[in-house]
Amino acid sequence: MRRLFLDGLISDEFTVTGDDAKHLLYSMRVRPQQVFTVVDKDGKVAQAEVSSCTADTVRMKFLHYIDDADTEPPIDVVVAQCLPKGDKMEYIVQKAVELGATSIVPVVSQHCVVKYDAKKKMQRQQKWQKIADEAAKQCGRTAKPTVEAVTDFKQLAEKYSDYTCFICYEAEDELSVKEALQKVNSAKYLILIGPEGGLSREEVQLCRQHGFISISLGKRILRTETASLAMLSILMYEKEAL
């Protein structure tokens, strides 16, 4: 059943506007008496029925709450992904949302091939957020993950200083992901994945100075889109979130 996220709280009657309304009206050809699953800003899930439509709004009425509908993992996981080439970021965002990531942070690094100006960064963030929103609806999330603004290593380290942070580094030969996860038990994690060209020694050193734990994902070199989703899956599984 189609899922909608509300900016406010569920009430006896409410109105859907903006892009969601346009999608309902002109893509889905919504009509009165159709029933949808709705999720409000507090994560409450209910079924609601379309009562009326205008050219740019959909009016809905509350039917009933859905019990035991929370699908969020018990841990908060941030995927910090250094900007990859092409449309790989779109794929990473979509799959990270499906796997339970709380947010995705695009990161600029020395070896990133793509270079965005301020306007392009904003456009990309908006595009990635739409992909995240659609993925959250499709996979039945009860919270909408966010795609943060493109950032750098220093800002990343400062903003997430209270998280358990892992940096997946291809030159790490002492600590495996399995060993690292067995040593920590946190409610909040961040995983940092480098771009196609890998992370520079300076970037790794900066992260280590801010408390990041350098880990290995094995003897084989993984593509950046493989590494991010593999690490996210392993973390979710190890912490009983899958």
Image: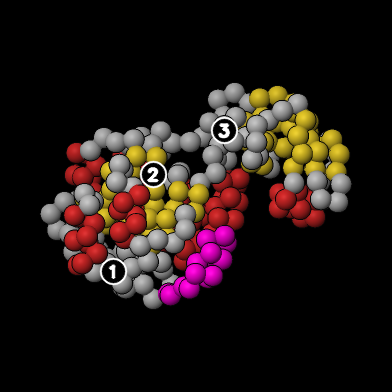
Which secondary structure class fits the magenta region best?
A: helix
Q: CA distance from mark 3 to mark 2?
A: 18 Å
| Contact? badges 3 and 2 (CB < 8 Å) | no
Q: Above or below — where is 43 with respect to 166?
A: above
Q: Which mark is residue 198?
A: 1
- The picture quadrant where one finds residue 106 is bottom left
* x and y, in percent, of residue 42 in the image: 57, 32
Question: Which kind of residue does numbered mark 3 sit on?
Answer: Gly
Q: Residue at x 74, y 32 (%)?
A: 48
**Camera-nearest residue between 215 and 161:** 161
Query: Within 10 Å of the Cα at label 1, are there few (<14), some (14-19), or many (20+) other Cα atoms?
Result: many
Question: Which kind of residue does numbered mark 2 sit on?
Answer: Val
Quarter of the image for the C terminus: give it: top left
- The picture quadrant where one finds residue 6 is top right
Residue 115 is covered by the magenta coloring: yes
Q: Above or below — where is 4 with respect to 11?
A: below
**Is 81 situated left or right of 140 in this image?**
left
Q: CA distance from mark 2 to mark 1?
A: 22 Å
Q: Which residue is mark 2?
A: 77
Which range is magenta?
A: 114-127
Q: CA distance from mark 1 to mark 3?
A: 38 Å
The mark nearer the N terminus, 2 or 1, is: 2
**Camera-nearest residue between 154 and 168:** 154
* x and y, in percent, of residue 56 in the image: 81, 50
Q: Nearer the viewer, mark 1 or mark 3?
A: 3
Q: Which residue is mark 3?
A: 43
| Contact? badges 2 and 1 (CB < 8 Å) | no
Quarter of the image for the N terminus: give it: top right
* x and y, in percent, of residue 168 in the image: 27, 57
**Is 74 situated left or right of 38 in this image?**
left
